[in-house]
């Protein structure tokens, strides 16, 4: 009977040790994420000071273990965030796992909705939802997309393609509204 109690105590000690180690791993992942965010904020501030106002570029890529959130060490989440501006358009792209959310703002005049939807199709993005509106003198669109299986599209690819397509359209029109 004495041995049984010692084994029970050993099991609880091992269980407590495992729980403690898992908490340490979770804390480590949270610290890694915080360090990545801090680095991105610093690089964004440096870029913001050195770049002109027409070309604004911020990117954050994080691939981290999801065990801190769901206890599984086998799943990895890919996420990136990017903001870009050109003379004619402002694009905000967020990619999380296999979903891409795109916010696009352009001056009122030429509607880029058809061009953008064609570009998204070329990038193998399935458009699940589109919302748009006229706010002041600007068209604002929000696209929720699913990245097709087997496609490896990054936020920078999406933003570059959309800016290229819209800027080309504006270049073809002699008078901007």
Image: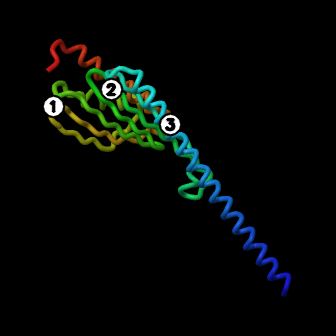
Residue 92 or 120: which is nearer the viewer?
92
Residue under label 2, please give it.
85
Q: Which residue is mark 1?
A: 137
What is the C-alpha distance between the residues marked 2 and 1? Answer: 17 Å
Q: Which residue occupies 33% across, 43% down?
A: 128
The residue positioned 64% from the left and 56% from the top of the image is: 24
CA distance for labels 1 and 3: 33 Å
**Alpha carbon distance from label 3 to label 2:** 19 Å
Callout 1: 10 Å neighbours few (<14), some, many (20+)?
few
Instruction: Tell me the residue at 75%/68% (across/down).
Output: 14
How many residues crowd around disc 2 within 10 Å: few (fewer than 14), some, or many (20 or more)? Answer: some
Q: Is residue 27 left or right of residue 118?
A: right
| Label located before the other in sequence (3 or 2) | 3
Residue contact between numbered discs 1 and 3, judged by CB atoms under 8 Å: no
Q: Position of residue 4 (x, y in %)?
A: 82, 82
* Snapshot quadrant of residue 140: top left
In this orientation, which residue lies closer to the viewer: 161 or 104? 104
The quarter of the rendered structure image containing the N terminus is: bottom right
Quadrant (top left, top right, bottom left, bottom right) of the C terminus:
top left
Proximity of marks 3 and 2: CB atoms separated by less than 8 Å: no
Instruction: Identify residue for label 3.
Output: 61
Q: Nearer the viewer, residue 38 or 114?
A: 38
Find residue 50 and name its label: none
């Amino acid at each position: 009977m004495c041995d049984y109690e010692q084994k029970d105590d050993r099991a609880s000690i091992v269980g407590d040790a495992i729980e403690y180690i898992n908490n340490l791993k979770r804390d480590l992942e949270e610290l890694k994420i915080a360090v990545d965010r801090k680095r991105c904020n610093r690089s964004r501030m440096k870029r913001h000071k050195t770049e002109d106002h027409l070309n604004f570029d911020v990117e954050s890529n994080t691939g981290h273990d999801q065990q801190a959130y769901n206890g599984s060490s086998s799943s990895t989440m890919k996420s990136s965030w990017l903001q870009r501006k050109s003379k004619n358009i402002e694009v905000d792209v967020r990619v999380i796992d296999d979903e891409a959310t795109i916010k696009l703002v352009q001056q009122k005049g030429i509607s880029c909705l058809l061009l953008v939807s064609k570009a998204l199709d070329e990038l193998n993005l399935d458009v699940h939802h589109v919302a748009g509106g006229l706010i002041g003198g600007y068209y604002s669109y929000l696209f929720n997309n699913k990245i097709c299986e087997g496609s490896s599209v990054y936020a920078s690819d999406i933003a570059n393609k959309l800016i290229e397509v819209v800027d080309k359209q504006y270049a073809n029109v002699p008078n901007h509204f």
